[in-house]
Image (spheres, rainbow, N blue to C red):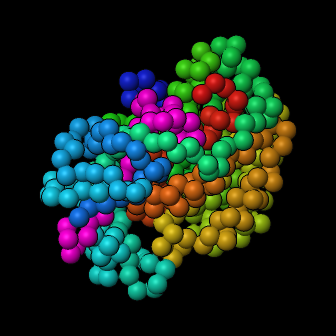
Amino acid sequence: MTTQIDPSKVSASAHRPVWGQGGTVQGEPVLLERDPATGTLSARLMFTPGELLAVRRSTGEALELDGMRLEGGNLVVTGRTDLPSLTPEELFPETPSTRAIEKHRDGKRLIHFSEGFYYHQLQLCVDYRTEEPWTGPVPESQPERLARTRQRLTQAEPVSLVVLGDSISEGANASGVTQAPPFQPSYPGLLARRLECATGGSIKLHNYSKGCTRSAWGKEQSDRVIAARPDLLIVGFGMNDASNGVAPAEFQQNIRDLLGSVRAALPTCECIVIAGMTPNPDWHLFLPEVRRDMSERLKALAGEGVAFCDVYSVWTELVRRKGFFSLTGNGANHPNDFGHRIYADCLYALFGLPQ
């Protein structure tokens, strides 16, 4: 799939990473949890807030702030029945339904789950002021490993970009893919547009990603990648490898073989390997030790012409601060628009270009 990027559909907040928000946070997503006894709604925020500025639906519609207040690190809402919310029992139901997936790590309950733009409609976007700085992980700039691509962009030469990964890289649950306002592109489109804006270069994006795939499938796509003759290849596998019992060493070898085949045929092609998001920590397929091992093994593949993108560490910190349900697009293993922006921001940081 070759994608043309529509600048009007690229959110301005995509260009403000969490580690560079300054004193104002814009468009932070929250899923309000409802206390069934009191009806009070609440959600954790990324930073300790100082002043609430605005709250919008994910479509961009502004909401009145009546009944909304900041309490500690939370947005708290009382006396409102017009806002989407879920109770703890709804987030972890005991009864199977069309919006539940097996299973909670306790082996008894399920996980509230739905594809499309269902979760997108449940989440609100919050603007607020804060004096708290980001103290979490910051992606490492690696321009020396992407020197050819960076040079082509800054000299306004065209760059061919191939993205190969699973459903996350395909664009799962980005509003632009599910055709819901504000129609934000998934992370490959966001990254391409941001690089173009920063350098004046042009990117032809080929996204060969496919849902439900693993690294072994990715390795088999080497001929297809080579045929596109990319200047830059971004590889994003791991979610399904871990969930389906692929050993970290086998996963690493599959990615190594893919990179080796491509770079043997195209010696000037530079590559980025992504250690991506983790799934719902209450899902029985969370498997934190396996996913941490896979991240470290991807990092070990970095070297001349191969950069390592550490979404994993940033995502882990965000889940610690906010919880998973404010960051997910499906409740289990996909990001929402904000999550796709995290991917794009982490990738952009590798190039050492101005923020």
Q: In the displayed structure, does residue 345 sit left or right of residue 30?
A: right
The residue sitting at 35% across, 56% down in the picture is: 71
Q: Can residue 84 be seen in this view?
A: no
Relative image position of residue 19 (x, y in whole percent): 58, 41
User: Residue visible at 67% across and 26% down?
Assistant: 353
Residue 208 sits in which quadrant? top right
202 in relation to 351, above or below? above
Residue 313: % across, % down = 64, 54
Q: Is 264 included in the stretch rendered in magenta? A: no
- With respect to residue 7, does 257 lie above or below? below
Magenta residues, start to end? 10-39
Total number of numbered discs in the rendering: 0
Residue at the location (62% across, 51% down)?
136
- Residue at 60%, 28% (x, y): give it: 355
Does residue 6 lie above or below 127 as drawn?
A: above
Residue 314, percent from left and from top:
60, 51
